[in-house]
Amino acid sequence: MRRARIVGLWLLAARACANANCDDGECEQPDATGLVQVTHKSKAKVNEAEPTNPDFGPNVIVLEPGAASSAIEDRLQSLYEQYISWDEDAQFGDHRTAILLKPGEHQVDVNLWYYSGVHGLGVSPEDVIVKPGLRGEGLRVEQQPPSYPGGPLLPNTNTFWRTIENVHVAQGKLDFFVSQAAPLRSVKVDGNLYLSAGGSDWTSGGALMNSDVSGSIVTGTQQQWYTRGTLMRPYDHPAGQGSYACISCVDRESGLPFYDSWNFEQHQPDQTWHSGLTYMGAPEVFAEKPYIFFHEGQYKLRIPEVLQNHAGPDWQSGSTVGFDKVFVTKAKTTAAQINTAIAAGKHIVFTPAVYYLDEPIVVNHPNTVLLGLGFATLIPQKLPIFIGRGVIEVGNVDGVRLAGVFVQAGPMDSPDFSKAVGALVRWGKPEEPYAGTKSNPGFIYDFIARVGGPDHEPSGVGNMLEIHNGWVIGDNLWLWKADHCVSNSGALCIPQRYVNHCLVVNAENVHMYGLMAEHANDDIVVWNGEKG
């Protein structure tokens, strides 16, 4: 007998300094805007230790704490204006940006655009405080601007691919009008969190995890929302509208976890509408997403601990890894270099870029972290080596954590899947079943798989995500065959996109929280496993 609980599843589904600082071949110098950019005099080999201040590349903006700067604000606003529209260059372009905020208080305005993320560099969200800058707006995702001057504001149905992580938003409220692939993670919000603009806006999100919201979560016209491990008030939503899941959350009034309550189909007295709410207790085992932080002049990687039956946020547990054990990629980094680093026991941090791979990334080293910043995107080239294989392949090892990585299908000329890439991510070996380990599961966080989108050429893959190992846990995934494009607004996009299934599970004890999967050619999800 096959059975599965799928929770939250929708099937439609500077340091500004006067002089340059140079040491051991590394120079850290502010540019004209006062933003720190890191350059190197020499190119490090794969197995050499990363420097104290690693080269994160041109798509990372590092901000020092302090008062607002007009140069910084103008640069951030310029990026927003360039990459906010629905056109192909913005919605499906190759631009990727991560804004890193060093510990302290920041006065800055950031209205997030496509493929952008704000990441605090504290050990906990409370170490990085964000207040409004010169425009008095702070962090936010606003309603989509008009498509022409003087036109109406557009709904936020397409507000994808942006994130805020590991910060204290101290601006009285947070407007976060988003749809899928736009997580709020490890944030402390003073005041209300608004998930849509209301009225004519329509959002289709979204995820909030490991957070603390002092006010209400105002869903408005939000169609769907997944919250996990958060200190919060009960969902405030119009009855009968949308689907809202809450896992392992704590009521900030009573301080107690919300009780299990599956009442999505519970009809109200008039028999015409449902509540649309699902509350669940803490997962049996779980660990929060890894992240980088900056402390005492050094970057480090934090790997949260696996906890049992833990409700509410976890901002304390975990171990710290120095960047001597981290390999930081660049846009031109090859899969062979990445695989060499993994085999040497290094963790991988993907800087914001689009990576065109010429061979699969293979993880056979236990406890490896693969962490993406700024929606780092992996795309396989059209090469025989990928036929039947995964773009990322995880072997029969425990404790691997894939976090914040975006994998997109490459070219595919016809719906002949025997000649296609087997999977965007293949976790485990189909021919060698592995039960996994409860005390050290594999984790997949903020994972995006996409087939199509850019209107360049036909694309496809056998399956987006395959899981053949037991004890693999997912937390916020969007597995999407693009159903809209710039040159053709209809559901049948030209060029065509092919994918058999979004998710295939062939193992026991697999748990998916906040799974959004849409538009496969065959069954969207195939789940062959018990106790998941």
Image: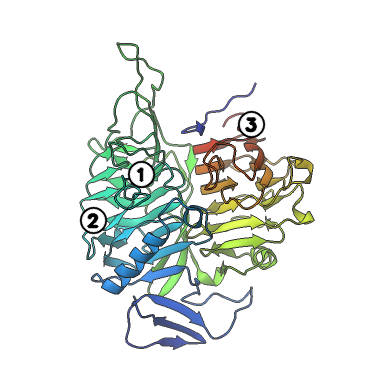
Q: Position of residue 8 (x, y in %)?
A: 46, 33
Give how far apart the Cα atoms at labels 3 and 1 are: 35 Å
**Quarter occupied by the N terminus:** top right
Q: Residue at x 37, y 74 (%)?
A: 296
Q: Which residue is mark 2?
A: 170
The mark total stands at: 3
Give how far apart the Cα atoms at labels 2 and 1 are: 28 Å
Q: Position of residue 405 (x, y in %)?
A: 54, 54
Sequence-first tag of 3 and 2:
2
Q: Does the image show residue 467?
A: no
**Quarter occupied by the C terminus:** top right
Dots 3 and 1: beta carbons under 8 Å? no
Residue at the outermost top position = 270
Residue 507 got which mark? none
Q: Residues within 10 Å of mark 3 (few under 14, many from 20)?
A: some
What amino acid is at disc 3?
A: Val
Is residue 293 toward the left or the right of residue 25 in the image?
Answer: left
Does residue 187 sit above or below 241 in this rendering?
A: below
User: Could you say which is closer to the camera, residue 225 or residue 203?
Assistant: 203
Is residue 71 toward the left or the right of residue 262 in the image?
Answer: left
Q: Which residue is mark 1?
A: 154
User: Could you say which is closer to the camera, residue 320 or residue 194?
Assistant: 194
Q: Which residue is mark 3?
A: 526
Q: Residues within 10 Å of mark 2 (few under 14, many from 20)?
A: many
Sequence-first tag of 2 and 1:
1
